[in-house]
Amino acid sequence: MTAFKDGELPKLVKTLLRPAPKLPLAVLLTRAVRRIAVRRSDLIERLGPTARVPIAVMPSDLPFSFRVSLDGANARVDVVTAGEAEKAAARIRAPLLILLGLLDGTYDGDALFFSRDLVIEGDTEHVLALRNTLEQADLTPAEFAGLGGPAADLVNRAATELLSGARRLVQAPAPQKLPV
Amino acid sequence: MPARRKRLELVCPAGTPAALRTAVDAGADTVYCGLNNETNARNFPGLNFSENELATAVRYAHGKGAKLLLAVNTFARAGATAIWTRAVDVAQACGADAVIAADLAVLDYAAKRYPDLRLHLSVQAAANTPEAIGYYQKTFGVRRVVLPRVLSVEEIARLNQEVAVETEAFVFGGLCVMTEGRCALSSYATGKSPNLTGVCSPPDHVVYEKTPDRRLLARLGGFTVDRFDEGEAAGYPTLCKGQFCAKGKAGYLFEDPVSLNAAALLPGLQEAGVTAVKIEGRQRGKAYIGSVVRAFRRAVEDLAGDGKANDLAEALTALTEGGRQTTGAYRKTWR
């Protein structure tokens, strides 16, 4: 018997994060996505009409969800309850480390859907547009943090190590990206 | 000591410029892609290349010794052929190594306007007889035919003896129902088809719904096409891979949700005279592209070296539809 299963963070994390203030996190994330949206206008173009549609990203092992809108300079991330997230036109649900693995190219979205590690609900068109845009984005943790140069390399390497270690620990699906 | 064999050409998919770079870096000899409109059979939101991105992609591929093919493989609409002819113009202007086409009007335009532009016949043309292939070769100068996934390895060998063009065979990825280029199932449910608008089961007609008993329903155009128990491996929401009731029994009537994996048949396909092997999946992510291309690169190199086959089943199971693999029509062992 193990405390970890299916890639989910331990329940204790959910309990500890429940009282945490949501606003600072929303502000930080909004700032990050606006920076990327402004710098990478090609991504907003690729998103098409989906840029104007709020999409719910629902980490199944966190006590809150994210409502993400990527409308260029007006892009924003709200930290919302699961009930509020359910009202979004399109919803993506998975453990946090799996969702992050979709961002960094560790996982293939279709394969996660086939294995039921990823749940898609609502207007599939928007989920697909977002997934395909993220595939093209090649976003790194440093870009989210607004870092460049040697600091960016350091942060990216550290984040990759941290995430793969965490995925092993919580028995997330094996990375689908085979080693080079 | 066994004689060294000629390497099979490895043709790989790319739905985005990032995926193209992944495919090339992972060892693709050739990458195929499409423009972001209905001229190709993977016309999904957020996918494909703008004209500028295509030009950059050609430079990247050529810089690394790889080729780039542009799929212009849907059927042009009467009275609205401009985007298809424009796509051919773009391929020529960008320096693409070939255009993959199926429609007679597109082939005719490309052959007449750009006689030096190499033409490959798309799987959408469903050409599987020497007569059909001979027609495309003589009429439009087609140099390669992508074989429909209806032939056994023995049938491919016989076909190759009777045609004067190269042949390319799918070896991995999603399987299409067995009348390629002529499927009306998606049109029936949604009004859009892979052959005309480039989308099979268009995502704006797909809805997934969780039931109170925690099952997942996949709906297409209002039809429930499949139902999965909690934890059960799922497939694409296509009618051909949906469940139907026939003679009082529910089941996968046309096709199971399963992916093609013909890695173990590479030696047979090479013996049969196939020039190139193709990986399906322009709609898939970089993790899929990188892993599948690297695995097949190794298999192709092993085959060219000692002639040994490797089924790659274990390495690639996690990436397959429904978590299952088949050799499809190549062995014709299904019910």
Image (cartoon, rainbow, N blue to C red):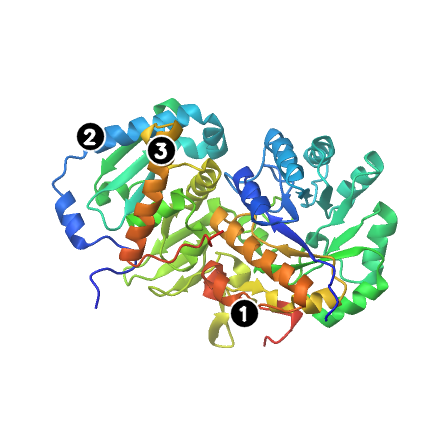
Q: Are marks 2 and 1 in contact (CB under 8 Å)?
A: no
From the image, tell me which residue sits under label 2: A24
Q: Dot 3, how many residues are within 10 Å of its Cα: few (below 14), some (14-19), or many (20+)?
A: some
From the image, tell me which residue sits under label 1: B253
Residues beneath discs 2 and 1 located on the same chain: no
Residue B189's x, y, as percent? Answer: 53, 53
**Front position among marks 3 and 1:** 3
Q: Amino acid at mark 1?
A: Leu
Front-most of residues B27 and B260: B27
From the image, tell me which residue sits under label 3: A142
Q: In the rendered view, does B26 fall on the left or right side of B125?
A: left
Output the chain of dot 3. A
Q: Which mark is residue B172?
A: none
Q: Quadrant of residue A112?
A: bottom left
Q: Is residue A34 above or below residue A156?
A: above
Q: In the rendered view, does A10 fall on the left or right side of B335?
A: left
Q: Dot 1, how many residues are within 10 Å of its Cα: few (below 14), some (14-19), or many (20+)?
A: some
Q: What is the CA distance from the residue labelled 3 to the residue labelled 1?
A: 49 Å
Front-most of residues B142 and B139: B142
Secondary structure at badge 3 equals: helix
Res. A75 in view: no
Output the chain of dot 2. A
